[in-house]
Amino acid sequence: MKVIIKSEYVQPLVDVNNGDEIRVIQVYGWVTTPTDPDKERFQILVELPNLDRKKMSVNKTSLRSIMEEWGDESDDWKGKKLVVRIVEQQAFGELKKIIYANPVGTKQEEEIPVIESDEGGA
């Protein structure tokens, strides 16, 4: 049996896989992280392919792509779809699976190299 640790945040290869489309439900904006009050992350609430809703921290690369396509008024992003790409890369001193999310139908959607789903889980 595959063991999955539940989270209120989107988890790569658990909640989403490469090519999945997710929909922006709400934009929280820059939020202070609970573990480091001096650090902020840009957060949104998304609807997953299975229709569950979870929070997602948006990295700066994805944020730039979203702003380039949809503009910098985040209220206009609600209801729009993003396509997910998962990349394995160094982050915070270790190799991690990183979620990139780009507006559906844009060039950026295809520019990020991806990893395939693994059987071992995240």
Image (cartoon, grey):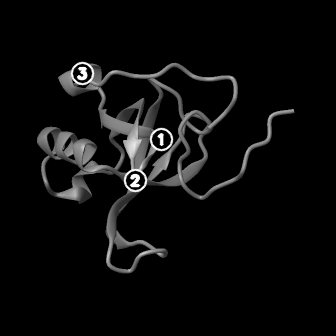
Residue at 23%, 43% (x, y): give it.
Answer: 61
Quadrant of the drawing holding the C terminus: top right
**Circle 1 crowding by C-alpha within 10 Å: few under 14, some 14–19, many from 20:** some
x then y, percent, for residue 16: 54, 34
88 or 77, nearer to the observer: 88
Residue at image mark 1: 96
Q: Is residue 108 above or below residue 51?
A: above
Q: Is residue 46 left or right of residue 63?
A: right
Find out whether the residues at labels 2 and 1 contact each other: C-beta distance under 8 Å.
Answer: yes
Q: CA distance from mark 2 to mark 1?
A: 9 Å
Quadrant of the drawing holding the N terminus: top right
Q: Is residue 105 left or right of residue 35?
A: left
Q: CA distance from mark 3 to mark 1?
A: 19 Å
Residue at 69%, 28% (x, y): give it.
Answer: 120
| The label number, if any, that marks residue 111 in the structure image | 3
Label whose residue precedes the other's in the sequence (3 or 1): 1
Residue at image mark 2: 92
Residue at 29%, 25% (x, y): give it.
Answer: 112
Q: Secondary structure at mark 1?
A: strand
x then y, percent, for residue 10: 53, 48
